[in-house]
Image: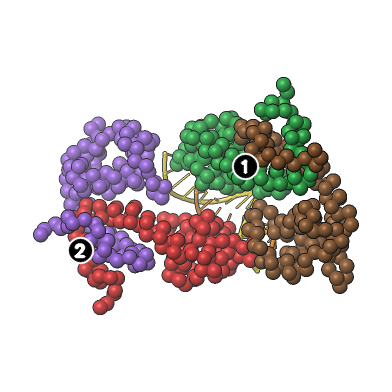
Chain colours: A green, B brown, C purple, D red, E yellow, F orange
DNA sequence: GTGGTCTAGACCACT
DNA sequence: GTGGTCTAGACCACA
């Protein structure tokens, strides 16, 4: 549990995204407690303050709530919220850029998708 | 011309990419002069030093050359070079991440591609 | 009975103030027993220790007394005591701040009072 | 410039409110630069990080914007935004509590207002 | 010059 | 036990 942090992103943001991914995947379920700031800091070999900053962001995104003296908990409905918000962002901001980029590089989307593993996200069929 | 700069990238890099895109698209042709540092800085509402830094990066990428007393010019062969390098990077680094992201969001690549528009951007057809 | 606790005040203090208000309003009469720590903790969805701390504060304010084996009771004269102390604090500390705030927001006190409702809450009239 | 900080509020929040008040009063005008993090930290005798935290909150409230490498600036329209938001909060949250408190203390609002200095916020007339 | 990030360590209030 | 706040000091990227 010492995820070599990337250089181009602050650690607290990477940790935040890690937690968000865990919620999305379901490995962190709604209502469940996040690992304590101190614990996660120990595991990840970072300063508690840095870990705390990651958690704060999750609170302000309303994915996580603080229960005083008890810890941080995944909010009910967090997963749906994440899914919805990220999809929106992807469709409106990221996807158009991706398409533009593919066109600029004069590549063919269909070829890319075929090469990826076929339709409906299955790896093999 | 005040392209709201993104927060997660330094301005000079965004400007550099903007110029590279222009070369790729063909709106900046090989042999052609780049707008002067001063002009671009004015238009983009940025510090001339920032614009200069972007141009320097293009020089060190060997996409642009400085002709003393005349300005900066797109190198012959810049477009092909860009196309080759960027395609590689896209296929090896960006595309896999995009696919992973789409799967995490439980979306269907085929649907995305279909929704993107009937004009299939194939190089040849 | 899950009164969304405010973030800027510890729960035990909010509970203490809640009880004090009840005494002031008369819904908790002098000589009457407070609900047991355990009960109030259940109702309010808080830790019994937190409820206990609130009650302890009321004891040290001499608004409530503990009768061993029986529970906590509102002291005779508690209401008058509260009324006197709180009025003083309100006039000296709170009211000036309120007036300053209204002025800072460029609002008119008279309008506020008028809008508050026709039922003028005078003691005598 | 060593404002004895209150005990019951974190310093960074008090500093944030101080700046917000300055915007409201007009002593910090829209478009103007805030004093740098380092400067304000020196003046206020606090840690730069604490000052930074205060500024961050102002950014997330969209009262202040960061211009990279230049500093923090009051957003155009910040004052109106503050005025509107704070008025709303006051009317919906604070005022009802104040009225309830006055009634609980069996005092008369009109008397309070009269004692304060008359109508329309004038101190003397 | 600007703000941002991170660390190590202390202290506190709340539950 | 939990998270929050603050400090002192270092280093970095950006303009």
Determine crowd level at label 1: few under 14, some 14-19, many 20+ residues with C-alpha closer than 10 A: some
- Residue D94: quadrant of the picture: bottom left
Judged by depth in the image, the label closer to the viewer, 1 or 2, is 1
Residue D110 numbered tag: 2
- Given residues A121 and C77, the one toward you in this image is A121
- Image quarter in which the C terminus of chain D is found: bottom left
The residue tagged 1 is A90
- Given residues C59 and E7, the one toward you in this image is E7
Image x and y of residue B50, in percent: 73, 64
Image x and y of residue A105, in percent: 78, 45
- Helix, strand or loop at label 2? It is helix
| Above or below: residue B108 compared with residue B57 | above
Horizontal side, residue B94 vs residue D30: left or right? right
Query: Is residue A3 at least partly visible in the picture?
Result: no
Tag 1 subunit? A
Query: CA separation, marks 1 and 2?
Result: 57 Å
- Helix, strand or loop at label 1? It is helix
């Amino acid at each position: 549990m010492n995820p070599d942090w990337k250089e181009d992103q602050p650690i607290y943001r990477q940790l935040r995204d890690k937690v968000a991914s865990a919620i999305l995947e379901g490995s962190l379920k709604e209502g469940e407690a996040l690992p304590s700031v101190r614990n996660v800091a120990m595991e990840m070999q970072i300063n508690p303050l840095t870990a705390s900053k990651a958690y704060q962001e999750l609170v302000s995104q309303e994915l996580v709530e603080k229960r005083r003296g008890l810890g941080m908990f995944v909010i009910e409905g967090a997963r749906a919220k994440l899914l919805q918000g990220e999809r929106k962002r992807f469709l409106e901001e990221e996807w158009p850029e991706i398409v533009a980029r593919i066109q600029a590089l004069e590549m063919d989307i269909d070829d890319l998708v075929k090469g990826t593993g076929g339709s409906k996200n299955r790896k093999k069929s």
